[in-house]
Amino acid sequence: MDDENKSKLKLLSQQWGASLFGVARLEEIPRDQILLPGHILDQLPLALSIGFHLSEGVIEEIENQPTPLYFHHYQRVNILLDTIGLRITSAIQELGFRALPIPASQIVDWKNQRGHLSHKRVAKLAGLGWIGRNNLLVNERFGSRIRLVTVLTNLPLEVDSPTRRDCGSCHACLSVCPAGAISERVEDFDHIRCYEQLRVFAKTLHFSHSICGVCVKACKGNG
């Protein structure tokens, strides 16, 4: 039944536009990294990770800064992912179980620029990719050209395993980063430099979201 439920939800998500689907155990993420009450985490032990493959045409238009087309695409994809999250939630509830959709792009801790949880961490645990040098999820097929949403649930589902792959010898994102925030080692990524550059783009380009997309374009995966 776990496999059947998972197959059903994966098919539904694909029908609604998703490109990636995986399941992870939420307990594998430290609780202090999730901004939700403990009782919710106790009641909803599994996390569905759902990804959307961004438009190659939109991404390829990016040069050294985000474009108006990318800004609009980014917004619409977030709305689509939230809609898929809502529909998956409804499907789970129809089966008699609980589900909680986590918004694709919502900051709840402005000081530290954090959402309720890290979608990329969930996606990594769900086998959708690895955390790259650019501090983004890297999928072997789509690279970092994806957006993610998460749904927490208590519906019994088969859990996926993380990939053993990493960026290997690829350094495509290092030289293109306008903030110089990317290093050889993943753990040396400079969050502050990155965020300051995003703020500059938002202000000078009059965007309501802090986005870049330069390293997203550079990262094509290695599948």
Image (cartoon, rainbow, N blue to C red):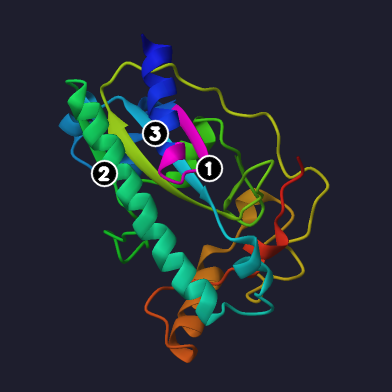
- Amino acid at dot 3: Leu
Q: Nearer the viewer, mark 3 or mark 2?
A: 3
- The image position of residue 7, as x and y in percent, is 44, 21
Q: CA distance from mark 1 to mark 3?
A: 11 Å
Q: CA distance from mark 1 to mark 2?
A: 16 Å
Q: Nearer the viewer, residue 79 or 196?
A: 79
Asked if residue 66 is positioned above or below residue 36 in the image, the reply reads: below
Q: Which residues are magenta?
A: 14-23
Could you say which disc has been placed on residue 86 in the image?
2
- The image position of residue 93, as x and y in percent, is 19, 28
Q: Is residue 15 magenta?
A: yes
- Say which label, 1 or 3, has the lower sequence index: 3
- In the rendered image, the quadrant that contains the N terminus is top left
- Amino acid at dot 2: Leu
Callout 3 secondary element: helix
Q: Which residue is mark 1?
A: 19
- Amino acid at dot 1: Ser
Question: In the orientation shown, which residue stands out farthest toward the bottom?
Answer: 204
Asked if residue 136 is positioned above or below residue 150 in the image, the reply reads: below
Residue at 43%, 39% in the rendered image: 15
Residue at 25%, 36% in the rendered image: 89
